[in-house]
Image (tube, coloured by chain):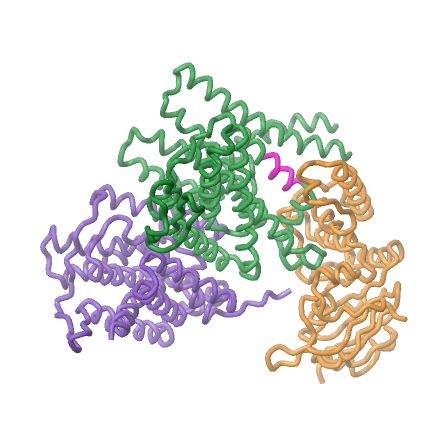
Chain colours: A green, B orange, C purple
Amino acid sequence: MFLKAVRSSTKSKYSTYIMVIAFFSIAAILVEAGVLGSLFKGLLIPMCYYIILAVSLNLTVGILGELSLGHAGFMCIGAYVGGVFSILTKDVITSSLIRFPLALIIGGLVAGIFGVLIGIPILRLNGDYLAIVTLAFGEIIKKLVQNFYFIKDVNGLHFSFANSIDPSTIDDVSKKVILSGPMSISGIPKDANIFIGVILVLVTLFVIMNLVDSRAGRAFMSIRDNRIVAEGVGINITKYKLIVFAVSAFFAGVAGSLFAHFSTVDSTKFDYNLSIIILVFVVLGGIGNIRGSVIAAVALYALPELLRAFQSYRMLIYAIILIAAMILNNNEKFLRFKEQFTFKRLFKTKHAKEDA
Amino acid sequence: MSLLEIKDLCISFGGLQAVQNFSMSVENNQLYGLIGPNGAGKTTVFNMLTGVYKPTSGSIVLDGVEIGGKSPMEISKCGIARTYQNIRLFSNMSVIDNVKVGLHNQIEYSTLSGIFRLPSYWKQEKLMNERAFELLKVFDLEHQSKNLSCNLPYGKQRKLEIVRALATNPKLLLLDEPAAGMNPNETAELMNTIKFIRDEFNIAILLIEHDMRLVSGICEQVAVLNFGSELTHGNTDEVLKDSRVITAYLGE
Amino acid sequence: MSFLSYLIGGISLGSIYALIALGYTMVYGIAKMLNFAHGDIIMVGGFTVFTAMSTMQFSPAISIISGIIVCTVMGVVIEKVAYKPLRNASSLSVLITAIGVSYLLENLALLIFGSSSQNFTSVVTFKPWHINEKLVISGETIVTIVVTTIIMIVLTLFVNHSKPGKAMLAVSEDKGAAQLMGINVNRTISITFAIGSSLAAVAGILLCSLYPQINAYTGQMPGIKAFIAAVLGGIGSIPGAMIGGLLLGVVENLSKAYISTQLADAISFAVLIIVLLFKPTGILGKKITEKV
């Protein structure tokens, strides 16, 4: 009895892993073969970090049931911490095979710590208030990072929030500017590659899907469905909320670190607009549906790129598609129409024969 | 020593004194009823017993331990479970998952073990699955284990709520108007179910009810609440014949 | 003396935030949704006036009126087309739809007006008021404060003493019960959106007069800040939106003056977080105890 239940949830997880591996393998092959242009090639690593961002946000929004509008802030922390780490250790740890994974982990850990730090004060807030506070935190992180100066020289490390660091304290000869406020970071080694990207996606899926399908996952969902009753049944609300914030922020940080080693880091990009883009992936992929987040992240990230042909109209079309999708998905007639075409209907007859 | 000792319990909301000097004791394995007209404060007492509200004064002692003012989570661990007036299941979770949440503190393994699928995960999940099925079987719900709990018919939802409460291994079970919305047949079945629970699970049951057939049918003792304070308490038959009680319900 | 001028500037900015916040808070209180596209209505108002004055050469008065009319109509149409079908959907779905509407408005503006900022001619014709040599208050600032004060007084009177206003209060308390009392919920919601949008139009015109640049994204940041102001004051509370807006504007301006221009926004947001730590439902927000 138990093994049967295990097999069905494991089946679903393995099919998700296979789907990811298959998609990226086929895409990589097609790119090498020249079937898919270099435009598509440049989309593959971003797809990886968007998947990680969407899946980690779905943990907070879909499984725990708390609306977070500050996910980009954790990505920002991961990007900066991971990037700075790589720059500082470039000469010490010369092998990127060791340095890059460390940068990813450290970026994730610091982001995760921030997730807990931010989580603690917002524990008491309800739905919409929590959302606006996460948005505020995201913006604060962005602003702080935008005004942060970090310079290394022969005397050690200097950092400040001022408009610039007093030049007299810096030894011009040995100075190396790591982070200069709005000019951001320069000099991060571009260690990212598609292979690591896919591995990170698989690790994220492994951790989060296992987490959801476990005792802790049930605790999260009970908090989502009815917090007061969950407490009455003995669930430690604080503990489980903080676990979700920590894990969700950790993976956002890892995604950020991956991003930093792939593309130029510009703090203005880590704003609420980005948080909202990821939220749209999550909602359209299905709240609480991890596999849906994977598909939505890939499809919706690629969609505007593929619509490039339409030039200036593409974002307009995207907006109309978004509105239409939300209205249709909540329209009873359309939902009934959709049910005719699900796979479930086809399998229903098959299972009936099995159980008989 | 009684299982549950309530002494001089008081709570006020703003200026309104909702419950005054309420005292009651429930023995092990007893079937106790809490009755009174609407708005008398019965659910408020339940909320104080389960930690949803903090009493302004008075004490609640369960099995020798003072639980007044503790958090709902701690009280659940001490051994009180409840059902709600309007059924509150975890609607987006399956029937069996609702029960498994109830078993959360009975069968444990660490979060890390869950993530990395360590041996304790496999061992404890198997145990949890078996225990959850056992409980569902007792109430004839095992065939709907995979269904979404919100899709169950009303009567089965009520049963599931009770199963979830029992999963927490309580010493005292609080039922808040369990017969609400039931017809006489269903009520009769419920009466047997409640007696069966008391006998099988060896627990005390305190219930709030308006259906006097059920109260007189199974409650051994009864306390009457009116306007936040106790009118009387004692053996069910005597209390229900008390003219003050009848007046409280029907008016002068 | 300069403190006073910064303070007044903050009140002026804050009044604009308050106007926008009022729209957010009313829609949230009555339609129970976060209209993320509200900030972009500001931009629509600004661009309408811009087009009316520069392309069509209308007088400032006619331009302002046309701006308000366009925004009001647009607000009502958006509600009917995009939000009404989702009345019974989850609040998250409605939020995403609102985001879609926001994208739509921004990209339409990009298409029509291009991506570079346009210069906006102020509609205010009052000369600056020289109180003394050190303290000069611009005409725009005066008009902003006066206009918003009048609007807030009128709105409060309207909501508390007129029939449609009381209908709005009823719907915000309990939609079902209001309907049973014979209140036309659809019409009440439309009126709410109409009022909110017209306030946003005024805010947009005043904003563009104070900071005379406009582009497709002009409404974004003020929209977010007004949202924060509404939450700060207690979302759903009209006086709360006014207090929240003013507070935010003053904090922002004083931070810009005395601490740092770049960190001013971060400080305003931090104020929100601190307030919510002590009052989880905002300054004037209602404490909601869940009934079990």
> Which SS type dominates the magenta stretch?
helix
**Viewed as shown, does residue A123 lie left or right of C215?**
right
The N terminus of chain A sits in image quarter: top right
Q: Residue at x 84, y 73 (%)?
A: B25
Please say if A207 is above or below C154. above
Q: Is residue A333 visible?
A: no
Is A9 left or right of C2, judged from the image as shown? Answer: right
Q: Is residue A144 left or right of residue A243?
A: left
Q: Is residue C27 magenta?
A: no
Taking depth in this image into account, of A136 and B248 the one nearest to the observer is A136
Disc count in the image?
0
Residue drawn at x 68%, y 28% is A351
User: Percent position (x, y) of residue C151?
Assistant: 28, 71
Residue C224 visible in rendering: yes
Would residue C10 be found to the left or right of residue A77 on screen? left
Q: Quadrant of the C terminus of chain A?
A: top right
Q: Residue at x 34, y 48 (%)?
A: C102
Residue shown at 48%/54% (left/top)? A134
- The residue range painted magenta reads A205-213
Is residue A212 covered in magenta? Answer: yes
- What percent of the width, then of the height, locates residue B95? 70, 45
**Among the 4 quarters of the image, the one containing residue C22:** bottom left
Query: Residue furthest toward the left?
Result: C57
Q: Nearer the viewer, residue B45 or A331?
A: B45
Q: Is residue A330 above or below residue B39?
A: above
Q: Position of residue C267 (x, y in %)?
A: 40, 61
Q: Position of residue A250 (x, y in %)?
A: 55, 43
